[in-house]
Image (cartoon, rainbow, N blue to C red):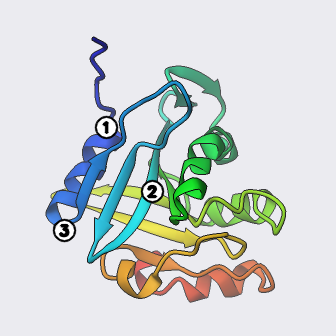
Amino acid sequence: MKTTVKTTSEILFEDFCKRRNILCNKIPESISATPDYRINYKGNELIVEIKEIDLKKGHCEIDGIQITGTELRYCLESSRKQMQYSKELNLPSIAIVYFEMVDFSDIIDTMKTTFNKNKNTSFSAVGKLINRPPDHEIQLFTNYYARNKINVQIFGEIFAICILNPKKDKKERIAEAGPTMQ
């Protein structure tokens, strides 16, 4: 039987859910690509894929393989197959990346070049997990082109959410983020 060691990002995410009374179920690994978690908050479900970038080491680790560089798009690209799982269930899905010392505008820039009406529609949002002891925060950036959108009214209670509109320029999108996302 394979024993799996949890990553820092998984430990922080599970703690985040526990502190907010979010039902968080680990999805069993299988031969096909599966995301990490299925969560339920007030009867609303989300599929969650967790990725971790270690900027101190200068790489993103995906499935135990180190990818040189700190480009967020590599982590998102590696999540595409996992996000297809949510398509079959007709549920919104989010990729949450844990990394330090990166301005959240990097996420906006990456989403602008990575998401469009024909590409990556299975991502409902991309999030940044922030460790702020004694608690944690998750900032979500919605995908305008998502097939299954997240319920921002409900999930706005637990996540800081920035609704991105590709028709606006970067400055306007950052201003929409609100004080917690500046």
Identify residue for label 2: 47
- The picture places residue 152, in percent across and down from the top left corner, at 46, 83
The x, y position of residue 123, in whole percent, is 62, 60
| Location of mark 1 (residue) | 8
The mark nearer the N terminus, 2 or 3, is 3
Badge 3 marks a residue whose secondary structure is loop
Q: Which mark is residue 20?
A: 3
Tell me if residue 157 comes above or below residue 35 in the rendering: below
Q: Can residue 56 be spotted in the picture?
A: yes
Question: In the image, 50: left or right of 141?
Answer: left
- Residue shown at the point (40%, 79%) measured from the top left: 180
Q: Position of residue 112 (x, y in %)?
A: 76, 66
Find the distance from the CA under tag 1 to the CA under tag 2: 19 Å
Q: Element at badge 2?
A: strand
- Mark 2 or mark 3, whichever is nearer to me: 2
What is the x, y in percent for residue 45? Answer: 38, 67
